[in-house]
Amino acid sequence: MVRVGRILIVGAGIGGLGAGTVLARLGIEVDLVEVRPDGAVLGIGINQPANSLRALRSIGVLEECLAVGYQFRHTRFHTWRGELIVDIESRLGGDGVPANNALPRPQLHRILTAAAEDAGAKIQYGTTVTHLATRPGRVEAGLSNGATETYDLVLGFDGIGSVTRRAVFGDRFEPVYSGCGAWRVPCPRPSEVTCTQVFQGIASKAGLLPLSREAMYLFAISKEPGNPHHDPGRLHELLRERLAGYTGLVGEICAGLTEHSGVVYSPMSEVMLPPPWYAGRVLILGDAAHAAMPHLTQGAAMALEDAVVLGAMLGEDRPVPETLAAFVQRRYPRVKLVQDVSHGILVAEVSTTAQTMPDFQRRLATELPSRMAVVEGILNQPA
Ligand SMILES: Cc1cc2nc3c(=O)[nH]c(=O)nc-3n(C[C@H](O)[C@H](O)[C@H](O)COP(=O)(O)OP(=O)(O)OC[C@H]3O[C@@H](n4cnc5c(N)ncnc54)[C@H](O)[C@@H]3O)c2cc1C
């Protein structure tokens, strides 16, 4: 017996839409509020590793995601001059899912939005929560459309800058800036780019990720001290400066960049909400609870796993407070592993100098394959 009748989800992003689908299918009345004015999302591409694909299968959209995406198993690490350092075969996958499926981010949102609506979740765009008041066994939520509603449970799936987290925990767990930023630019996929290719430079890195038969994106990570605001009209020049000296395909793409290339820049921050992630009947999930560096491409996976695991646990017949406690206990070690490993990779790659580069390359070749095998072995286990 499901013991919640009505749930509010704040944020119709990847996790919120996944949760909306799973919970509405349990027969729960689901309201989703999304601050954006419509369902359109910005963003270029997103990789979904096998554990995310298993969550997407539970949500019922795996086949659609595979149909529009690009599947691959390997990650090839090179020097910034294009010499191969190591080619790592992923341990993820099996059980009917490939190791990785990358796809255009707007497609993932379109697929998840349709699934949530089909399941019966009601999405209100241009709407947010204005206040949350905890009452015994329920929450009173004020919405920006003027309504005040009562819910059995409120889920804060509103991303790294979560207002729900702030409403519950104050400003104690704000995002921490990493000192680095991520750059992305969409490009046509040449036939030789058939898996993730990484190019390690001194204190920076670039990479190529195939997104479909036709498309890929170039990404880069650079040190950005002081969290600067970059002029959107100059992003193409700034990315070219960051990747000066990179040769091969990365160098060619950089040489052709213009202000119309669609370069996107994101400062990178982390959040780790210590357990418990809830107070009363308000639970914080996804990036709002555990935003990590993007290095393992596990952020959406962790949000989708949160959604699927919570749905399964709410479907069990036990008191809601017990379910919330058990949920956080089950999820925390896994998201902490992803955050710690991702953070460690970032620190290592942006700390490289001309002096340490030979040793860094040697360790990539000799140590990274076994370390990745351990992490992927854990992530390939059920969430
Ligand atoms: C550069 C970069 C690259 C990445 N690449 C990958 C990748 O390849 N693979 C991967 O799995 N992950 C990747 N990630 C991480 C991934 O994008 C996130 O982990 C994932 O989107 C988290 O899902 P979420 O639902 O928790 O939050 P989000 O997807 O951020 O959704 C939050 C939603 O809440 C809405 N919202 C915000 N505030 C409010 C409010 N006050 N009221 C109502 N709604 C609100 C937002 O508009 C948004 O729709 C990357 C991240 C970065 C920065």
Image: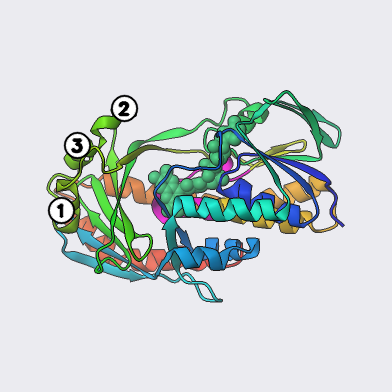
How is this picture coloured?
A: rainbow
Between disc 2 and disc 3, whose residue precedes? 2
Q: Few, some or many C-alpha atoms within 10 Å of disc 2 (few <14, some 14-19, many ≥20)?
A: few
Q: Is residue 341 visible?
A: no
The residue to which callout 1 is attached is 252
Residue located at (76% from left, 42% from top) = 7
Is label 2 in contact with label 1 (beta carbons under 8 Å)? Answer: no
Under mark 3, the amino acid is Glu
Q: From mark 2 to mark 1, how far is it between C-alphas? A: 27 Å
Q: From mark 1 to mark 3, how far is it between C-alphas? A: 14 Å
Residue 162 vs 130, above or below: the answer is: below
Under mark 2, the amino acid is Pro
User: Which numbered circle lies on residue 228?
Assistant: 2
In the rendered image, residue 300 lying in the magenta stretch gets the answer: yes
In the rendered image, residue 357 lying in the magenta stretch gets the answer: no
Left or right: 135 as drawn, with respect to 13: right
Q: Quadrant of residue 244?
A: top left
How far from the left and from the top, in percent, is residue 156?
Answer: 65, 38
Left or right: 153 as drawn, with respect to 254: right
Is label 2 in contact with label 3 (beta carbons under 8 Å)? Answer: no
The residue to which callout 3 is attached is 237
Between disc 2 and disc 1, whose residue precedes? 2
Q: Few, some or many C-alpha atoms within 10 Å of disc 3 (few <14, some 14-19, many ≥20)?
A: some
Where, quadrant-wise, is the C terminus in this rendering? bottom right
